[in-house]
């Protein structure tokens, strides 16, 4: 976890009770070339380096059919992020903003999301491009960008009826 004394001007933290209200089940881990936060890109890029999602063996059957999609969403746990800032000052501009107005990894529940290009699936290994997380980041979930099984939004009534 990040040093809680390492704050920029204008940032504000809150004291939090230990979390006890949810349990996540990590389904694997992510292999990236990024070994420190300084080496991580600010946002993932589709032309970035290949990264590998390593799924636990029991989750391999859940990959069936995923190769039909070009793009997938990856959800991961930002395990080295602090969780107590409500105001943050990004080093790129120094302007203070609320945590929920930023895509910073510093969040009350540090869940990262990435829209990535699916390169290949080989058993428990899913190779993608577009991630922006540290090597060995815990994997929470992945899902296709769009799916034929998603329900359609209900039609809104028109003004005439």
Image: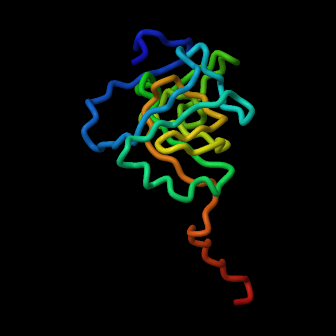
Q: Looking at the rendering, in which quadrant would you find the C terminus?
A: bottom right
Relative vertical location of residue 137 with respect to residue 67 in this rendering, above or below: above
At 65% across and 78% down in the image, what residue appears? Answer: 155
Which image quarter: residue 117?
top right
> Which quadrant of the figure contains the N terminus?
top left
Which of the pair 37/83 is nearer the observer? 37
Q: Which residue is found at the position 38% from the left and 41% from the top?
A: 56
Q: Whole-percent x and y of residue 107?
A: 47, 32
The image quadrant that residue 25 belongs to is: top left
Residue drawn at (53%, 16%) of the image: 35
Residue 76, given in percent of the width and then of the height, sits at 48, 37
* Left or right of 123 on screen, residue 96: right
Q: Which color scheme did the rendering employ for the protein?
A: rainbow
Q: How many marks?
A: 0
Q: Position of residue 79 (x, y in %)?
A: 42, 27
Residue 145 position in % (x across, y down):
63, 54
90 is higher (above) or lower (below) than 151: above
- State the image quarter where residue 4 is shown: top left
Q: Residue furthest bottom?
A: 161
* Residue in the picture at 60% in, 36% down: 101
The foreground one among 79 and 136 is: 136
Outermost residue toward the front in this view: 122
Residue 125, compared with residue 49, is above or below; it is: below
């Amino acid at each position: 976890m990040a040093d809680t004394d390492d704050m920029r001007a204008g940032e504000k933290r809150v004291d939090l009770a230990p979390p006890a209200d949810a349990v996540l089940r990590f389904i694997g881990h992510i292999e990236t070339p990024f070994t420190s936060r300084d080496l991580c890109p600010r946002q993932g890029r589709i032309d970035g380096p290949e990264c590998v999602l390593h799924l636990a063996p029991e989750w391999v059957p859940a990959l069936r059919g995923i190769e039909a999609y070009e793009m997938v969403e990856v959800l991961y746990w930002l395990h080295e992020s602090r969780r107590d800032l409500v105001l943050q000052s990004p080093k790129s501009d120094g302007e203070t903003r609320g945590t929920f107005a930023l895509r910073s990894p510093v969040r009350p529940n540090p869940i990262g999301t990435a829209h990535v290009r699916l390169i290949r699936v080989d058993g428990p290994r899913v190779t993608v491009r577009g991630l922006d997380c540290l090597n060995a980041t815990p994997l929470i979930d992945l899902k296709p960008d769009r799916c034929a099984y998603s329900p359609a939004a209900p039609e809104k009534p028109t003004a005439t009826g």
